[in-house]
Amino acid sequence: MQDADDTKGAAHAGHRHITPVPRVTMQVFCETPGMAETIDGAVKDRRMAKAHVKVHMGGGPAAVEAYRNAPTPNLIVIESQSPRETLIEQLDELAQFCDSGTKVIVIGRVNDIILYRDLISRGVSQYLVAPFDSMYFVQAVSELYSHPSAEPLGRLIAVVGGKGGVGSSTIAHNLAWTVARGMDLATVIVDMDLAFGTAGLDFNQDPPQGIAEAVFAPDRFDSNVLDRLLSRCSDRLNLLAAPATLDRTYDFAENSFENLLDVMRASVPLVVLDVPHLWTAWSRRVICSVDEVLIVAAPDLANLRNVKNIVDTLRAARPNDKKPKLVMNFVGVPKRPEISIADFMRAVELEPTAVIPFEPKLFGTAANNGQMIAEVEPASKIAEAISDIGRAVTGRAEVKKVKRTILDPFIAKLSKKLAS
């Protein structure tokens, strides 16, 4: 049961990891407009996207009347400001019509342990003390459907470019490799560019099967099929590769990748999604539904406009989530006019997690050899920057202060030039 400290902390629920609510039917019976508004805000959160929710007014009496001649949903939520005796009578009457397996949440105004025990003894799943915010309600419903012995669901990170050709795939692949190796965290890199994906090339892999089998046969896809489709890159890193062939077109419906992501979230601690630079129903759905979004951009006008549009879209679609993270790539290309990092940052209202200088020899060598940056030059500034990105997106630790290297004078000079 919620206490005073829970209420104070509820406002910060959006920054904690909350398991998405499964496909359940839910009917809410409110007594006050304020609670109806709170529930409406919860329904709009991405973690409630699969739940089918209807909100009614009338509280307990309305719930009793609704189910006299109708089957009950998976979850009934009742707000009640009635005295304890009246509430108990309403619940006892409702129990006569509840189907087996229906869960009930009661929302009240009194933090009363005796009332709480009475409700639990009558089969009520949870008692919430109002007022609370929308994310607290999402968390309560999520916990109701999370088995106590189940392992925490995995974390999904989408990496997307502000424009084509800015190196988002390279960053995604190096990020996955670095996290798996440096943090000893089981990771899967998913190449979602089915026609032109480069993950197989970057990891020097040519698997016969991959993401196409999962997407084109979603009904047969489960954790066992996932294990068969993954290609092993290292002890902790696996690849779900793209076919990278043009023998068919890859037009998908909005929810085509939904089952794939659900299975992966339940099977893998960390999933890095290499999302191609396009804007379709499915790509928008993927980007808006993940736990963390990482945008890779170059310092030019087209990238600035596109990143601003992506940030604004995510702000509207994910109001209870943290801002996406930004990586500035290809910084300092000789003789190319660039927007300064400071101006770029002010325009998109994001501070870069990392600024990666233009190093064509290092990146070219790694790409041609099917290696990662840290395999070619483990002590390089760029390898350390990718490690910082990994720590930032996984929340494992604060970004470490980079040790001084021989490149420091060059970086300082470059930063001063870009800021001028």
Image: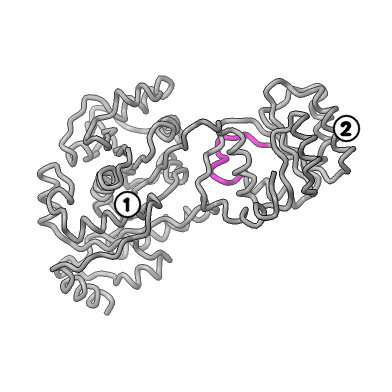
- In the picture shown, does residue 79 fall above or below 316? above
Say which residue appears at 21% left-offset and 58% top-offset: 382
Identify the residue at horizontal 20%, vertical 70% (top origin).
411
Of residue 280 and residue 387, the one placed in the foreground of this image is 387
Mark-to-mark CA distance, 2 and 1: 54 Å
Please name the amino acid that badge 1 sits on. Answer: Gly
Identify the secondary structure beneath mark 2: helix
Residue type at mark 2?
Glu
Q: Could you tell me which secondary element the residue under label 1 belongs to? A: helix
Image disc number at residue 224: none
Q: Position of residue 220 (x, y in %)?
A: 40, 19
* Residue 419 point in image, percent of width and height: 28, 76
Quadrant position of residue 25: top right
Q: Is residue 154 above or below residue 37?
A: above
Q: Is residue 29 visible?
A: no
* Residue 14 placement (x, y as % from top left): 55, 52
Is there a contact, CB below 8 Å, between mark 2 and mark 1? no
- Assess whether residue 46 is covered by the magenta stretch: yes
Region of the chain picked out in magenta, as a range? 43-53
Question: Quadrant where the C terminus lies?
Answer: bottom left
Colouring rule applied to residues:
one colour
What residue is shown with label 1?
390
Q: Which residue is mark 2?
A: 89
As for residue 103 lying within the magenta part, the answer is: no
> Where is 264 relative to 69, above or below?
below
Q: Position of residue 282 (x, y in %)?
A: 42, 39
